[in-house]
Image: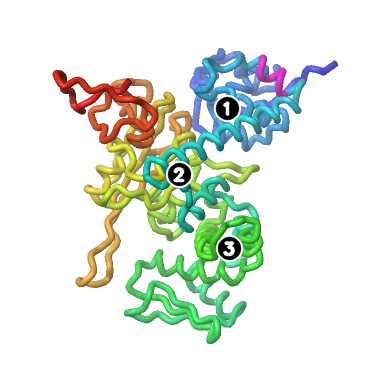
Amino acid sequence: MSVKRRIFAGSQLRNLRAARNLRQAEMADRLDISVSYLSQLENDDRPLSNALLERLAREFPLDWQDVGADSTEKRLVALREATADPLFAEPLPAEQLARIAEQQPGFAERFIALHEAYRRTGQRLEMVDEALAADNASGTRLPWEEVRDWFHFANNYVDTIDRAAEALSIGLIGDHGLSPLSEALEQQLAIGFSVSVRYESNRGLREFDPQMGHLVIDPAQPAETRRFQLAHQLAALALKAEIASVIAAATLRSPAGRQLLFVGLCNYAASAILMPYRTFREEARRLRHDIDRLAHAFGTSFEQTCQRLSTLQRADARGVPFYFCKVDMAGNITKRHSATRLQFARFGGACPLWIVHEAVAIPDRILVQLAETPDGVRYVSMAKGLVKPSGSFERSPRRYALALGCEAAHADEFVYADGLDLASPHRMEKIGVSCRLCPRPDCDQRAFPPSDRAILVDPDQRGIVPYRIN
């Protein structure tokens, strides 16, 4: 017979409230309990109930994770997230979930794994559907699509490389703040690998001669980009074994795909060197993921900072689940990853109602949007248009936009959500993945009908589009 656990967490509750700068009345209101009850909990006069544990995990998911919950509590959080899927009519009661997590751990873990497999299978079916819609009936993926999908199904986090890069970074930082300086990277290349660095114009962004040990970098690049190129080359040499091991296990079909994965993993490691995981995660949470302030603190670019935020998925210290993408002037998604339930279209453009498209036309200005996808999940999105100089009058500058967002449940952690009315249905844009995958029948911006629905055409009636969706 199972013995009911009595969980006392007074100090953790007090620390959580202090970290969030909440008064007892405000904390009690968030937890839907009385102030006197909260006071008893904080003084360890009463244990936490299963319902309160579930509420704490829901209201403060990252904070409560950091408290050091035991395996049963972590299982309960994962089970709650799985059963809250829009697939189910309504979530199970907190007490019932707690009993399952504690008394039937094997079943709970299998259910969680099954739900994850279901989610991944759904994503793969969407890929096949889009390939067919794009007249790619064979389903054959180009090398860069293989690599993009590999990072997606790795959840954009590679543990062995991330930890090795973090250890390397800590050894280089010393007393110089949060991130290694360019001088430290150059010194490590010279001492550890006999690589000399030269800055010369009219070359590529980065060119390495492994025989001579010469690394040439274009000085016309911004300082953040030059430092990233140094980190990339250091990662390629210092983490060669770790990167090779990951590539060997990736089972990519083409040599080009494996070479692209090598480049991608070196870029990933470079980000982890410049923004070491735990330091970056702590600073990101302290600054509430203010990208400009984070970029200044770590000496990184806006894009590098956004992309690193999307990789914070380490099992024992997860960050906010973000989605990240890069969109060019034509609406093509050239970079994408999502740790949220929002998924991106693989072919064609994204939903025209998404704020990222407006951001492309308005560089150097941050736009914010509250949006809801057809499954009822709400997201807070930040988008910014950027112009990257070409370094020459003869070449046009590159113009694109970046988008970073999270589910509205994490709005407290995201400074860009400040001022949004998260509960108002009138302040919310109804978006989809793409027109071919969006089931909404009443969208004024629809470019194509959904690929899985029939259309009805009446010559005597005309709406915004010349058909109705059956």
Left of 137 or right of it: where is 173? right
What's the amino acid at mark 2?
A: Leu
Q: Which residues are magenta?
A: 96-101
Residue 273 visible here: no
Q: Residue at left 49%, top 32%? A: 21
Task: Give the SS element for disc 1.
Answer: helix
Q: Are marks 2 and 1 in contact (CB under 8 Å)?
A: no
The crowd level at tag 3 (other Cα within 10 Å; few <14, some 14-19, many 20+) is: many
- Image x and y of residue 109, in percent: 70, 30
Q: What amino acid is at disc 1?
A: Glu
Question: According to the image, label 3 marks what residue?
Answer: 169
Position of the C terminus by quadrant:
top left
Name the side, left or right, on which 219 lies relative to 47: left
Give the spatial CA distance, label 2 vs label 3.
Answer: 21 Å
Q: CA distance from mark 2 to mark 1?
A: 26 Å
**27 relative to 216 in the view: left or right:** right
Is 37 colored magenta in this rendering?
Answer: no
| Farthest residue, direction bottom | 212
Residue 303: image quadrant is bottom left
Which circle, 1 or 3, is nearer the viewer? Answer: 1
Task: Give the residue at mark 1.
Answer: 81
Toward the viewer: 203 or 16? 203
The residue beneath circle 2 is 287
